[in-house]
Amino acid sequence: MQNSIHVELSEGEVKVLKCLKEAGRAMEVHELAEQANLSLSSVMSYLEALNRKGLVKV
């Protein structure tokens, strides 16, 4: 039996997760914002949302 979970993500959340995956390590928020080409406030919002969804630990 296969278990799966469906989580809806915004485009920004996907960008942030991809950057973290590609880096393969923890990143500073400003570094992540630069890499994802997003503002600091956007990255913080996306990280908070991802944290609530249990996908990242902030």
Image: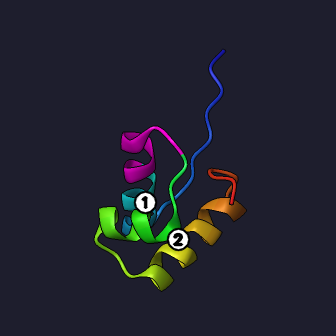
Closer to the N terminus: mark 2 or mark 1?
1
Q: Decide: marks 2, 1 in contact (CB < 8 A)?
A: yes
The stretch of residues the image draws in magenta is 18-25
Q: Up-down: is 34 above or below 6?
A: below
Residue sitting at x 71%, y 64%: 52
31 falls in the magenta region = no
Q: Secondary structure at mark 1?
A: helix
Tell me how far mark 2 sits from mark 1, CA to CA.
7 Å
Residue sitting at x 36%, y 66%: 11
**The residue under label 2 is which amino acid type?**
Tyr
Residue sitting at x 52%, y 62%: 28
Total label count? Answer: 2
Q: Quadrant of residue 5?
A: top right
Q: Which mark is residue 16?
A: 1
Q: At which x and y percent is residue 20?
A: 45, 49
Q: At which x and y percent is residue 1?
A: 66, 15
Determine which residue is flagged by label 2: 46
Q: At which x and y percent is residue 44?
A: 55, 76
| The C terminus: image quadrant | bottom right
Q: Residues within 10 Å of mark 1 (few under 14, many from 20)?
A: many
Q: Quadrant of residue 40?
A: bottom left
Q: At which x and y percent is residue 13?
A: 46, 63
**SS assignment for the magenta stretch, majority:** helix
Q: Secondary structure at mark 2?
A: helix
Given residues 34 and 54, the one toward you in this image is: 34
